[in-house]
Image (tube, grey):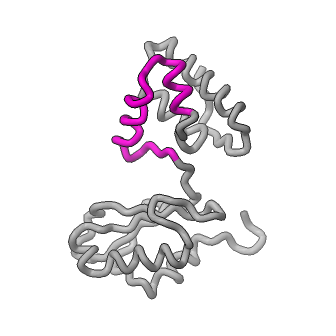
């Protein structure tokens, strides 16, 4: 029986590893499928850090280098927990030329976060992508896969304010 997709962020590392072991046991019964194991573990835990990769390697016999290689190759896997909202800034040629780098710089300053990291409050993760297919209306960013076009650094505060929790809400 497969585990449900619930975040276990409050679990201790030991509890997480036991949970991962149960997930692996489930898939081993079905001829061990690394991609399915990784997807399930990430859905349950939100990320696949090194400690969990090591456990998957020990339990399945798949070399750690192979597991890490798969995780780093596919963009949908992450070794770090992501924020509630994912901000992606296009740095394709059109977006870059029309100010994409200035948007990245301003977001890093506003959120006090580096590219690929999550804000201290867990609200935002900042990422850079190569193209969003909105070249004619560059520069573009997306928040939770909703694309915003012709963005400039001065619009960012207003844009992000929609994603902060209202007073009394979590």
Q: Is residue 10 left or right of residue 98?
A: right
Q: Is residue 163 left or right of residue 143?
A: right
What are the residue bounds of the magenta stretch?
52-79
Residue at horizontal 48 percent and vertical 32 percent from the top: 38
Quarter containing the N terminus: top right
Q: Is residue 114 left or right of residue 166?
A: left
Residue at horizontal 62 percent and vertical 60 percent from the top: 122
Q: Residue 31: image x %, image y %?
A: 43, 13
Residue 114 in view (yes/no): yes
Magenta: main secondary structure: helix
Quarter assignment of residue 98: bottom left
Quarter assignment of residue 64: top left
Vertical side of 11 occupied by 56: above or below = above
Residue furthest right in the image: 168
Quarter assignment of residue 167: bottom right
Q: Residue 148: image x %, image y %?
A: 39, 73
Vertical side of 38 occupied by 33: above or below = above
Q: Residue 113: image x %, image y %?
A: 53, 68
């Amino acid at each position: 029986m497969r585990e449900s997709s619930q975040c276990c962020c409050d679990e201790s590392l030991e509890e997480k590893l036991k949970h991962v072991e149960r997930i692996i046991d489930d898939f081993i019964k079905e001829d061990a499928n690394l991609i399915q194991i990784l997807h399930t573990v990430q859905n349950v835990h939100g990320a696949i850090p090194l400690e969990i990769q090591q456990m998957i390697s020990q339990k399945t016999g798949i070399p750690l280098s192979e597991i890490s290689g798969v995780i780093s190759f596919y963009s949908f896997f992450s070794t770090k927990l992501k924020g509630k909202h994912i901000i992606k800034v296009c740095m394709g040629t059109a977006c870059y030329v029309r100010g994409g780098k200035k948007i990245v710089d301003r977001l890093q300053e506003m959120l006090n976060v580096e590219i690929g990291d999550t804000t201290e409050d867990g609200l935002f993760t900042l990422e850079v992508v190569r193209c969003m297919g909105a070249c004619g209306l560059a520069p573009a960013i997306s928040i939770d896969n909703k694309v915003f076009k012709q963005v400039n650094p001065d619009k960012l505060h207003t844009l992000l304010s929609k994603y902060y929790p209202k007073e009394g809400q979590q």
